[in-house]
Image (cartoon, helix red, strand yellow):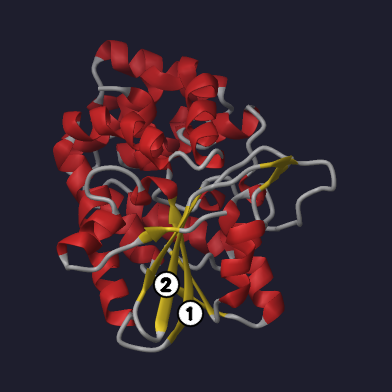
Amino acid sequence: MKWPSFRWLAAGLLLLGACSQEHPASAREPAARSTYVTPALWAVKDADTTIYLFGTVHVMKPGLDWFKDGVRSAFDRSGELVLEIVEPDDQQALAATMAGKALARDGVKLSARLGSQERTRYQAAMSANGLPWQAFELFNPWMAGMALSVQPLEKLGYKSELGAEKLLTATARRSGKKIDALETIDEQLGYFAGLPMEQQVKFLNATVDGLPDMDREFARLVQHWQNGEPEKLAAEMNESLEATPELAEVLLIQRNARWAQWIKQRLTRPGTVFIAVGAGHLSGKGSVQAQLKTMGISSARVKQ
């Protein structure tokens, strides 16, 4: 299994702020000296409705100025911002909800679910990233895998407070836009909590095995995003999706299908909406756009 694609799929599913609560939820306008980037944007339209589709990155390094030109114009024209989930202000309550979902109900310790070599690598990886593995013993493997999908990125300079959703949400609130969500927090956590144990262990082991290549591989994925290259992003994902079809079906394909249904229903009401979801949902096989196409609804790339 190709780790980077698997990791992109998993890390894009949950608010990164929920896993790194020591970082305050905030958003800032890009600094004056920034690297200008042009991530992809699509539009779905009928006679009286326009729905923009924007793929996000949940963590970024400082200095990327993406909220401009076509993206900013589309956002400003929209009366409503729709995200995967709306992040609550109470991060401690969110952490408690996450911990409750992750608690192992069968009483089996996490390390006991791993083979001897897997356990040694896992415990070493947790310790190297400042995550006490002992504190995760009562949780299911997806919880530790998610933590290891986040903490190292912070060490590499990626900041959850610079994620696209943070800036979009803060700007929407300042301008009085309605903010809605495609899913609830319980639903999103439930996708992980409902995974068969075999898939959870596979996710954790794949995350551990991929840590040495994280900086290079994640940087390449972000590069595709900031260059507006969904085809290349899709190519990175395809091998992983084919290698883990059951996981991809639950965490990606089925959710994209539900979101496409939401868009279809929203087209029945007039207005302009800006939808922002993880970039992996708008790339490759089974993407939101592909799901819409099966319904006879076309989407077009917006020139920037």
146 left or right, relative to 161: left
Return the x and y of residue 252 as percentages of the image width and height: 27, 49
Q: Which residue is mark 1?
A: 272
Residue lying farthest to the top in this orientation: 117
Return the x and y of residue 167 as percentages of the image width and height: 65, 60
Q: CA distance from mark 1 to mark 2?
A: 6 Å
> Which residue corresponds to the image point at 18% horizontal and 32% vertical from the top-left?
242
> Which residue corresponds to the image point at 55% horizontal and 81% vertical from the top-left?
79
**Marking on residue 51:** 2
When asked about the image quadrant of residue 233, the answer is top left
Circle 2 SS class: strand
Q: Amino acid at mark 1?
A: Thr
Q: Is residue 73 visible?
A: yes
Q: Is residue 89 visible?
A: no
Q: Is residue 176 above or below residue 90?
A: below
Q: Is residue 271 above or below residue 182?
A: below
Q: Quadrant of the C terminus?
A: bottom right
> Which residue corresponds to the image point at 52% horizontal and 52% vertical from the top-left?
18
Q: Is residue 185 above or below residue 99?
A: below
Label 1 crowd (10 A; few <14 / some 14-19 / many >=20):
many
Tell me which label, 1 or 2, sits earlier in the chain.
2
Return the x and y of residue 165 as percentages of the image width and height: 56, 58
> Which residue corresponds to the image point at 30% horizontal and 16% vertical from the top-left?
118
